[in-house]
Image: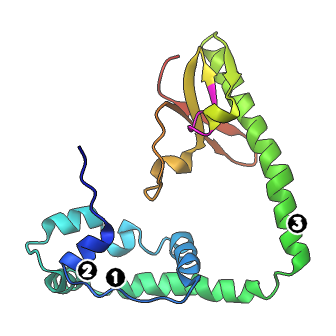
C-alpha cells in the first residue's frame, strides 16, 4: 500500500499562491541559481535545520520568521543569480548555428566516446585492484542504471558531483563507483569490496 501526495496538494493545503513564470524562464533561472550557488546554505541557510527550528505551522509566519532569522539572504541570493542572468544575456547573442553544431558534435562524439570509454577504464582498474574480472553492461542493464559488473556485482559509475545532487529522480540499486577528473588525472572513489 502506498500514499502519494502531490506537491500541488501541499501548496493547496497551505493556501500558497504560486508565482507564474513565462515559458522556459524557469529552466534559465534554474541554471543561473545552480551555477551561481545562490541557494547554498552559506547564502540562504541550511533549510532543513531552519524549517525544523521554525516554531509555527503557518506559511506567512514562516516567511516572517525566516526573514528575521536570515535578513537579506533572499536579496543576496537574488543578486548572485541575477549576476549570472546578466552573463547569460551577454553570451546568448554570440551563440550562432555553427557554435550549436560544434557543441552537439562535442557532446555526441567527444563526450560520448570519452565518457563510455572512461567507464571501461574505471571498471578495469577497480577489478584489477581486487584481482577479479569485469564486464560492461548490456543496453537493458544500462537502462536500470547499471554501467557494468565487477566480479558479477552490478555497479554504477558516476562523477563525484552526482553524490551531492539532491534533485535527482532516479534511485540506483547497485554499488556505486565515483570519480573526479581534472586536467591531470582521474580519481576513482569506491567504498565496497567486490
Q: Are marks 2 and 1 in contact (CB under 8 Å)?
A: yes
Residue 26 drawn at (x, y percent): 52, 80
Q: Mark 1 or 3, which is nearer the eye?
A: 3
Closer-to-camera residue (97/119): 97
Residue, x 45% and y 43% (percent of image)?
A: 171
Q: Taking 91 as reference, is 40 above or below it? A: above
For marks 1 and 3, the one nearer the N-term is 1
The image quarter containing residue 78 is bottom left
Characterize the local packing of mark 2: few (<14), some (14-19) or many (20 or more) Cα atoms within 10 angstroms: some
Classify 5 as above or below 60.
above
Magenta segment? 143-148
- SS at mark 1? helix
Q: Residues within 10 Å of mark 3 (few under 14, many from 20)?
A: few
Q: CA distance from mark 2 to mark 3?
A: 44 Å
User: Callout 3: helix, strand or loop?
Assistant: helix
CB atoms of marks 2 and 3 within 8 Å: no
Instruction: Provide residue 179's location: percent of width, then percent of height.
Output: 61, 39
The vertical placement of 166 against 78, above or below, is: above
Q: Which mark is residue 102?
A: 3
Position of 161 with respect to 89 (left or right) is: left
- Is residue 144 a member of the stretch shown in magenta? yes
Q: CA distance from mark 2 to mark 1?
A: 6 Å
Number of the label disc, if any, that sits on residue 103: none
Residue 73, labelled with which disc?
A: 1
- Seen in the image, is 108 located left or right of residue 49? right
First reached walking from the N terminus: tag 2 or tag 3? 2
Question: Magenta residues: mostly which secondary structure?
Answer: loop
Q: Residues within 10 Å of mark 1 (few under 14, many from 20)?
A: some
Residue in the image at 26% along x and 77% along y: 11
Label 2, on which residue?
70
The label nearer to you, 2 versus 3, is 3
Amino acid at each position: 500500500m502506498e500514499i502519494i501526495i502531490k506537491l500541488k496538494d501541499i501548496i493547496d493545503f497551505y493556501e500558497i499562491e504560486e508565482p507564474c513564470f513565462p515559458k522556459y524562464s524557469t529552466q534559465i533561472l534554474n541554471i543561473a541559481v545552480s551555477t551561481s550557488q545562490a541557494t547554498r546554505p552559506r547564502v540562504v541557510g541550511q533549510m532543513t535545520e531552519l524549517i525544523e527550528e521554525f516554531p509555527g505551522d503557518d506559511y506567512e509566519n514562516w516567511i516572517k520568521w525566516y526573514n528575521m532569522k536570515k535578513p537579506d539572504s533572499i536579496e543576496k541570493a537574488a543578486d548572485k543569480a541575477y549576476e549570472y542572468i546578466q552573463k547569460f544575456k551577454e553570451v546568448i547573442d554570440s551563440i550562432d548555428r555553427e557554435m550549436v553544431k560544434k557543441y552537439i558534435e562535442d557532446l555526441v562524439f567527444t563526450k560520448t566516446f570519452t565518457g563510455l570509454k572512461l567507464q571501461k577504464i574505471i571498471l578495469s582498474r577497480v577489478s584489477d585492484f581486487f584481482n577479479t574480472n569485469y564486464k560492461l553492461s548490456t543496453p537493458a542493464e544500462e537502462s536500470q542504471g547499471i554501467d557494468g559488473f565487477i566480479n558479477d556485482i552490478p555497479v554504477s559509475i558516476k562523477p563525484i558531483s552526482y553524490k551531492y545532487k539532491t534533485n535527482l529522480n532516479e534511485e540506483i540499486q547497485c554499488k556505486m563507483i565515483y570519480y573526479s577528473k581534472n586536467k591531470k588525472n582521474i580519481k576513482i572513489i569506491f567504498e565496497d569490496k567486490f
